[in-house]
Structures are given as structure tokens and as C-alpha cells.
Amino acid sequence: MKLLKVLQTRSQSNSRFVRKRREYILEGDMGTYLRIYLIWCVIGAVFGAVFGYRLPNTVIPEHYRLEIVTDLDEDHFDFSGTVWIDVTCTSPTNNITLHSKMLDIDQNKVSVSAVNTPDHNLNITGVDFDEDNDFLIINLSEALKADEKYRVQIPFDGKLANILAGYYRSSYQDADGKKVWLATTQFEPSDARRAFPCFDEPAMKAKFTISIGRKEGYTAISNMPLEKTENIIGKPGWEWDRFQTTDMVQKGRHRPNRFRQRRRSEDPQLLREMKGAIDQIAFAKDVGPKILSFYEKYFDIDYPLPKQDMIAIPDFAAGAMENWGLITFREIYLLLDPKLSSLKS
């Protein structure tokens, strides 16, 4: 296994070498260099698969039902939830392997059942954690059957990160100078596993039905429109925001978000703003719908989602993130103060 790791590392290093020196390579025998480069790419892919950091394809996710409650009190900064994942078995297997990172999971509360018999849980012999590959491995006493559908239930707990990845906390000062906390996400390229157990690879697309638990006074925003709000039973002062089910989405494009909201519009294109930043959203609120309309006409394709939100995040690693129905921006790329900023800036 050490040899495989060495070969994998060397193949990746060789690929970087080619990219850095491509201007010199182009001056030589392009055919020879191209063949060598392709061989290196194949070697990297093969040893990557052998080394085992990719998920097996014996089980494929189809639908996630995610409930997650977030506590933004400074004494806590944590979240807890449960995910129910409907999967299809593509070939017989005695385990279900998915991703999980920096999450606390009580293996005694994990369950697997056939979708057509949800009250009958399969026998789980153990739950293993492969920290090197961020794998959560659910071992079963009997093999899953090919073409059968199963439901995996996993309760989990976690801490809101102070890094700009996964499910993390951020803050801003409102117009009164008060510090206000928010929780947001950045899942691309492989950090959805920090927020909830999932099959965290782009090819494994699935539908999502998301419910976000929050304290009264906060607003939750997700990829799809809000369907209903209801009290959390046994938790006074807390509410569930339940959102419509998405179409097929990969994990990097899924985003539960929440932060305080000043006002709401009925337009399909909304711009969510922090209290005190209302004067800085006028430009984006005017230009955003026009850009969306332009591309609908240019490509002759109607915008496929029921809404498009744009929000500014105080702490955000990328310039922007093109999540379905909810584009997140670094503040400087969305907010514009007409008194201080020029169009050129």
C-alpha cells in the first residue's frame, strides 16, 4: 500500500511538472510529450482508484431528507440533525460506504431498512470510520440485493467551523454596531461531508428535501422556496423551516443558509441583505434580474428554478458560488455603496 501511495504521489507530481512547463514542451515533439502526459494521467487515475479514496459504486443515493438544527449562541456554535438517504443497490454488498468528516455519530443510532419495509431494520454488525479517506462504513450481516432500494438513517452532531469550509459561522455588525452571528456553507469541492453524512462526490447527484431548525428571530434560506414553517415540538422558541424538494443536485450545489433578513420581495429574483446594508444592494438588485433575463433570451432557455436569491457573506473564500437558486457572494463582489464606490471599482 505504501508503494501505491508513492506511485500516486509521483504521478500527481509529474502532472504538475507538465502543466508548469507546457510552454517548453510545446517546442518539442508534441506527440511524444502528449503520450507521456496521458500515460501519467492514467497512472494517477488508476492508482487513485486502487488507493481507495473514491467511494465504491455499489450503492447510489437518490434522495436526501435532511433535518438540521443550528445554535448560534456564542456559548454553543453547534448543530445537530438527522439525514435519511434513499439509495439504490447496484450490486450485492455487505456495507454502505459514504463520507463524514468532523461529525459526531452515535453508531448505535444508525439504521438501514428496505424502503418497502421501513419498520424492519437490517442487522448492522458495526460502523467503522476511515479518517484517512473520510469514510463512514456501515457493515451489514447480510448483503444488500441488487436493484433494491434502501433507506439509511444517520443522526449526527457537529460544531460550526471557524474555517471557510463546510458548515461554518460568520458575523457582521448591524446598523447599531451590534455583532450578529450567521451560519453558512461552502461545500465545493468536497466539504459537504463536514455538514452531514453524504455521498460527497459530484457524480452522485440526488434530490434534497431540507428542513432547517432555528431560533425565532432568525431566517433560514435554502436552494428552494420555503414550503412551511412550524414549531419544533419539545423545543419552545424554535421553529422548523421546511423547503420544497429540489431536482437532482450534487452536494457542492446544495446549500442550507441562514442569517437575519431585513425585508422580502415577491420577485423570483431576490437579494437578501444584512441589516444596515440596504443602501448597498440597489445596483445588484437592479442588474441581477436583467442579467438573468438576458441569458434566458440568449440561450432560448427559461430559468428552470422557482427562485434565484443572491446573498452577501462577510467571510467567504471564493468570489462567488453558483449554487442552484441561491448564489452566495463575497461582500465586495455584491454590495456597492454609491457614496463611496465608483462603477469602475
Image (tube, rainbow, N blue to C red):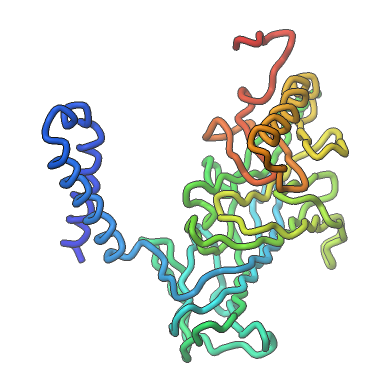
Answer left or right for 267 relative to 154.
right
- Quarter of the rendering occupied by the N terminus: bottom left
Q: Nearer the viewer, residue 154 or 251?
A: 251
- Where residue 343 sits: x, y (%)? 65, 11
| Residue at the outermost front position | 300
Q: How many marks?
A: 0
- Seen in the picture, residue 272 relative to 204 is either above or below; the reply is above
- Quarter of the rendering occupied by the C terminus: top right
- Seen in the picture, residue 132 relative to 142 is either above or below; the reply is above
Q: Nearer the viewer, residue 67 or 310?
A: 310
Answer left or right for 236 relative to 69.
right
- Where residue 178 sits: x, y (%)? 76, 29
User: What residue appears at the point 62 percent right and 78 percent down from the top-left corner?
Assistant: 151
- Where residue 293 sits: x, y (%)? 73, 32
Could you say which quadrant of the image residue 181 lies in?
A: top right
User: What residue appears at the point 53 percent right and 40 percent down from the top-left corner?
Assistant: 164
User: What residue appears at the point 16 percent right and 46 percent down from the top-left corner?
Assistant: 36
Could you say which quadrant of the image residue 249 lies in?
A: bottom right
User: What residue appears at the point 49 percent right and 84 percent down from the top-left corner?
Assistant: 146
- Where residue 30 sits: x, y (%)? 16, 36
- Seen in the picture, residue 154 relative to 290 is either above or below; the reply is below
